[in-house]
Image (tube, rainbow, N blue to C red):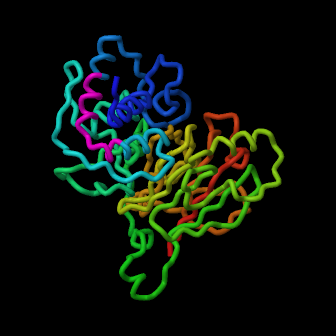
Amino acid sequence: MFRTKRSGLVRRLWRSRAPVEGDGEADRGTHGSGGCCMGKATKVAKSNAGSEAELKALTHSILKRIKEKQLEVLLQAVESKGGARSPCLLLPNKVDAKVGQQSYSLPMLLYKVFRWPDLRHSSELKRLSCCESYGKINPELVCCNPHHMSRLCELESPPPPYSRYPMDYLKPPDSLALQESGDRAHWCVVAYWEEKTRVGRLYSVQEPSLDIFYDLPQGNGFCLGQLCSDNKSQLVQMVRAKIGYGIQLTREPDGVWVYNRSCYPIFIKSATLDNPDSRTLLVHKVFPGFSIKAFDYDKAGSLQRPNDHEFTQQPRTGFTVQISFVKGWGQCYTRQFISSCPCWLEVIFNTR
């Protein structure tokens, strides 16, 4: 029987759909437990044969109406799990699809099929800044590339209200003023640590977005895999190998966001995620595919002091965010200090 290229692309896409609970290979980012404060994740039961057949028929029907070149873009993004750079997939925003009694827009259906089967509402999503649709409201054509989106990491309980203090010194520098002065100042520096030892140089960040990774196809940014480390610990080596696609650090108008691109959770401590008067800040668990606002400019303005440092080998003082790959620390974990974690980052913001 003659099969078209389009049909082949559709079949490959369906085989690459996101697994659900019960498939034996469910994405680590869609479920899990543990941690003091984490992205809320809901387990999804494996669908019955009827709803699975209905979803398959609907997805095939929609994909067959998409242009061949667009199917190739979608397949590139899905098969690489977001590791390869893929362009936007601009499709009509108002096409509705119905699964059972539930109606979904075309973007939502693609996000559910290829990223998050438990996705219920668009309010759970955050568009990545690399996307053409970022910051646009209800355009006729919207990007439906599932790997140009992330899930919002909601805290289990909001921090207490913050008192207001002047905060101009914490806002990101004005781009036009920097161009006029000819100065391209960094907005943060990143230090990579293995346990108590810093590895490599400080990485100065000037661009609004930075990829920090161990092994990323077409990776451009801070590659931890290229750093020379003398640490022979088996745990460090194991965790280092699990960093994979790593994280994306992005400076946006409301603060600094961290997107977990890896296949394993990351753990974050930041003064703006918790009560600024607390002596011990909580460590927040962020699952794969989730984003969290790791540093909030407005909340930072109310802080009376930068968050605490656990030891003296700090490259400089200022507001910092600490991020550990795979292993957590703090009051809910066996490791009490981040310096006991195998592989971790310190992001130090330029407050000048």
Residue 263 location, x and y as percent?
55, 38
Residue at point 63%, 54% (across, down): 345
Residue at point 47%, 39% (across, down): 79
Secondary structure predominantly adopted by residues drawn in magenta: helix
As for residue 40 lying within the magenta part, the answer is no
Residue 176 location, x and y as percent?
36, 80
Q: Nearer the viewer, residue 60 or 177?
A: 60
| Magenta residues (range) | 57-71
Residue 307 location, x and y as percent?
57, 57
Q: Quick check: 169 above or below 156? A: below
Numbered-mark total:
0
Determine the image quadrant of residue 331.
Answer: top right
Q: Nearer the viewer, residue 217 or 22?
A: 217
Determine the image quadrant of residue 224.
Answer: bottom right
Q: Residue furthest bottom?
A: 181
The quadrant in which the N terminus is found is: top left
Residue at point 56%, 47% (across, down): 245
Residue at point 30%, 44% (across, down): 144
- Compared across the picture, whether 54 is left or right of 252 comes to left
Q: Quick check: 319 above or below 8? A: below
Determine the image quadrant of residue 65.
Answer: top left
Q: Quick check: 130 above or below 338? A: below
